[in-house]
Amino acid sequence: MADRASLDYLYSLQTFGIKLGLDNIRVLLHRLDRPDRAFRCVLVAGTNGKGSTSATLAHIATAAGVRTGLYTSPHLHCFTERVQVDGVAITQDTVDQLVEELRLVGQGLPLTFFEFTTALALEYFRRQQVELAVLEVGMGGRLDATNAVTPCLSVITPIAYDHQAWLGTTLSAIAAEKAGILRANVPVVISRQEPEASAALQSAAAAVGAPLIQADADFSLAAGADGTFDYLGLDCALPGFRPALLGRHQQDNMATALAAAELLRRQGLLLPEPSLRYGVETVRWPGRLEWRAPGLLLDGAHNGAGARTLATYLADAGITRVHWVVGVKQDKDLSAILTPLLPFTVAAYCVAPPIEAASAPETVAAAVRTSGVPATVWPTPLAALTAAQTACGEKEIVLVAGSLFLVAAVRVLSLPEESAVAS
């Protein structure tokens, strides 16, 4: 199957939309003779931070010499980014081959894009003889396709309002859906949470019988003034981490990954302390607080919690004047994204992210103007970026945020990756 045809087939499965449930993925995995049982699995659920937490944990394991698979979504630029072994993405030729094989195996099943892709990743990991697979859960938890596997460890990163139409309208309801990945006698690492979410997760863990390891109770970090942090863990205390990823929230994510690594050590994986440090200090997770050049900051914040986290970073960095290239998906809470960031915004450059379900930039511009911030509408990300960079003055920066799809588009337009710098 030609590479374009294989991807066309996969994306055509999106016509089934979001279909929460495990019946079809379980049948498909059974027909494949359960590839997920060939290795240990870690499930990482949550609203924000699950991708960077997953990437950090996988990077730690790879650094220790453990053959490790990493499954994440969505991708920034290329489908193959979703499925990696030891930091190397699956090849397009292998995707073509597996799509052809799994199409035959899955005949008669109305599989969604995410179900098919999850099975593809698991089968690839088996063929690659991985010892550990870190699986980022999709939108939910309880009925997410990744939940068809039996994990050796669960992780839940911060829970916030997002996808309420499917997951519920309260933090406790959303947390209950995320807690669907919990299993009896399988430990779960919980990041710092809002009190409502924390209570729901504690209740779910007690009901299932999942040993609970919580941030600030069982492990913690102490942030330094210079961007470093000390980690006080379950079995070790490690000082002076200099994280590769920026922002206070990433220190929390990395502490969660470190606690997960400690639990995997308790289960027999050899993850020596140098691998913990190396994983935290060299992991990459593009598009999240990523400086593409001096004065150009990209961040995938696409909900209220993400926008507040980004605002905290701007304040900590002393950034007060931002030219914001902004675009959002139609199903997002626009006010929740705008409110934390408009106090930093000199002007907004509104554009539709390159996705079908994008909010009209005119709608975004109108909402921005109600706060007294100037806003203009642009036909393409390139036009918006060019305008923002032209208007950007001394001690000002250009920020691209609101949608990971928009960030991906601007990444392609900005400087080559090797020229990216951290600030």
Image: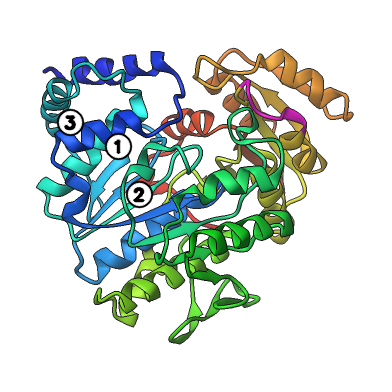
Q: Is residue 92 above or below residue 317?
A: above
Secondary structure of the magenta portion, mostly? loop
Nearer to us of marks 3 and 1 is: 1
Image location of residue 417, percent across then percent down: 37, 44
Q: CA distance from mark 1 to mark 2?
A: 9 Å
Q: Residue type at mark 3?
A: Val
Q: Secondary structure at mark 1?
A: helix
Q: Is residue 333 magenta?
A: yes
| Residue 135, disc | 2
Q: Which residues are magenta?
A: 330-335
Q: Which residue is mark 3?
A: 95
Question: Local crowd at mark 3 within 10 Å, few (<14), some, or many (≥20)?
Answer: many
Question: Local crowd at mark 2 within 10 Å, few (<14), some, or many (≥20)?
Answer: many
Q: Is residue 109 left or right of residue 291?
A: left
Q: Secondary structure at mark 3?
A: helix
- Which of the image's four quarters has the N terminus? top left
**Count of numbered marks:** 3
Q: Are marks 1 and 2 in contact (CB under 8 Å)?
A: yes
Q: Is residue 363 left or right of residue 55?
A: right
Q: Which residue is mark 1?
A: 118
Q: CA distance from mark 3 to mark 1?
A: 12 Å
Disc 2 or 3, which lies upstream in sequence?
Answer: 3
Disc 3 or 1, which lies upstream in sequence?
Answer: 3
Q: Is residue 357 left or right of residue 109?
A: right
